[in-house]
Image (cartoon, grey):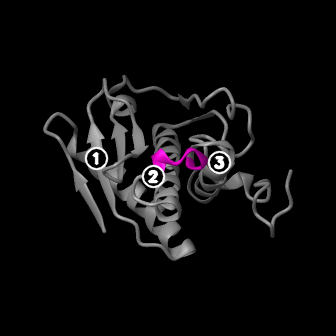
Amino acid sequence: MITNNCPNNVSVKFHNQVVEIVTEMANALMDEWGHDFPLLIKTIHNNGRSTGGGQNNHVCISDAYDVQPRKRVYELVEYKSIANKKVIGTIKGDQETVLKALCAHEVAHWWHQQLLRAEYGEEWWLDPKSRKGYNSAHGTRWQMIYADLRTMFVNPDTKGTNPWWPDEEAA
């Protein structure tokens, strides 16, 4: 079940755009993997930080890109550990492309945490195995999910370079 929440200080147009993007991504994952996880989509004003997952099963997107003065090129700077990766690294583009990349990043966290909850139980974060290595916040499992979303929705030009797709040739 997907629900959404729009606070008064966020543009309704921006909120609806986020809901559309996140819903499409979440539905693609649910269709592909056969799960039906709960999802709350939220938007927050400029100073907030975008997040995904958490105890309330949310994807929360900040309107920081929406309220910036209009630019020709926007940039989503990824964490140093993945910034230079071809499929999931830092991305430059128009406002919509960068917003989709941000949504993909946070949807990947939400999906990852739902998988951990299904595997380790409702209080999955209490089990050390659920937070290390393959399962760490930006570990291999999350990167696989993020790469899937980025290739499907953000940068389809990287199709065939996702090293985790067994039917694709890695770059």
> Marks 2 and 1, Cα distance to the nearest angstrom?
12 Å
- Check if residue 126 falls in the magenta segment: yes
Instruction: Specify start and end residues of the magenta stretch as a single range.
Output: 124-130
The amino acid type of the residue labelled 1 equals Lys
The amino acid type of the residue labelled 2 equals Trp
**Residue 110 - label:** 2
Numbered circles on residues, count: 3
Q: Is residue 21 left or right of residue 171?
A: left
Residue farthest left in this picture: 8
- Dot 2 and dot 1 residues touching (CB under 8 Å): no
Q: Which residue is mark 3?
A: 143
- Dot 3 and dot 1 residues touching (CB under 8 Å): no
> Marks 2 and 3, Cα distance to the nearest angstrom?
13 Å
- Check if residue 153 falls in the magenta segment: no
Magenta stretch: helix, strand or loop mostly? helix
> Marks 3 and 1, Cα distance to the nearest angstrom?
23 Å
